[in-house]
Amino acid sequence: MGIVKYMETNHLSLNLIQPLWEKLNEHHRRQKSHFKDHYENFSFQERKKALLNKAKEGEMLICLAEDEDSGILVGYSVTIISAENVGEIDSVYVEGDYRLLGIGNELMKRSLGWMDKKGVNSRKVVVAAGNQEVISFYERYGFRRRSINLEMPLDHI
């Protein structure tokens, strides 16, 4: 592991995060949840389309973390500001070997700083069911539980 370099880009670089996003999706699939089928069948193309639609009338920031020695992406964050001027940390992932090195912290600081510069009305992050261990990470940045959304899995309809 070498020095980590950070880059900020926009929706045009969304394809760069695909390999890391697929690892995040696999992590969600392995969680104890009623929505395993969703993650088993969820493709990057679907996720990309959803992110682009969400940002259509707003803006998107993609922060990339790259190991300078290997040139490999080791983390990313996707942040969207909607047409309603709501900022959302939409996706964050850091490779396992690179966790606890401050990469997630740097990605969050850049995302939150961007929202500050843009003057968002509010900020939010949605955590997938079964991924509770990440809640304390987001709480460090001032996020608090506001509501709990329940959804009926398709196999129960």
Image (tube, rainbow, N blue to C red):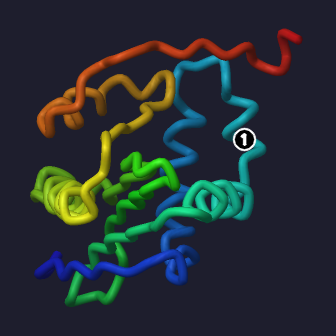
Quadrant where the image shows the C terminus: top right
- Total count of labels: 1
Who is closer to the viewer here, 101 or 46? Answer: 46
Q: Residue 85 location, x and y as percent?
A: 41, 51
Q: Quadrant of residue 22?
A: bottom right
57 shown above or below 7: above
For label 1, the residue is 40
Q: Is residue 82 left or right of residue 49?
A: left
Q: Is residue 22 left or right of residue 154?
A: left
Q: Residue 95 location, x and y as percent?
A: 33, 59
Mark 1, residues whose alpha carbon is within 10 Å: few (<14), some, or many (≥20)? few
Q: Residue at x 30, y 54 (%)?
A: 96
Q: Quadrant of residue 70?
A: bottom left
10 shown above or below 152: below
108 shown above or below 153: below
Quadrant where the image shows the N terminus: bottom left
Q: Residue 146 location, x and y as percent?
A: 34, 17
Q: Give the residue type that dot 1 points to.
A: Glu
Q: Residue at x 25, y 56 (%)?
A: 119
Q: Residue 80 location, x and y as percent?
A: 44, 57
Who is closer to the viewer here, 108 or 114? Answer: 114
Q: Residue at x 44, y 34 (%)?
A: 126
Who is closer to the viewer here, 39 or 126? Answer: 126
Q: Residue at x 49, y 70 (%)?
A: 17
Q: Is residue 124 left or right of residue 108?
A: right
State the SS at label 1: helix
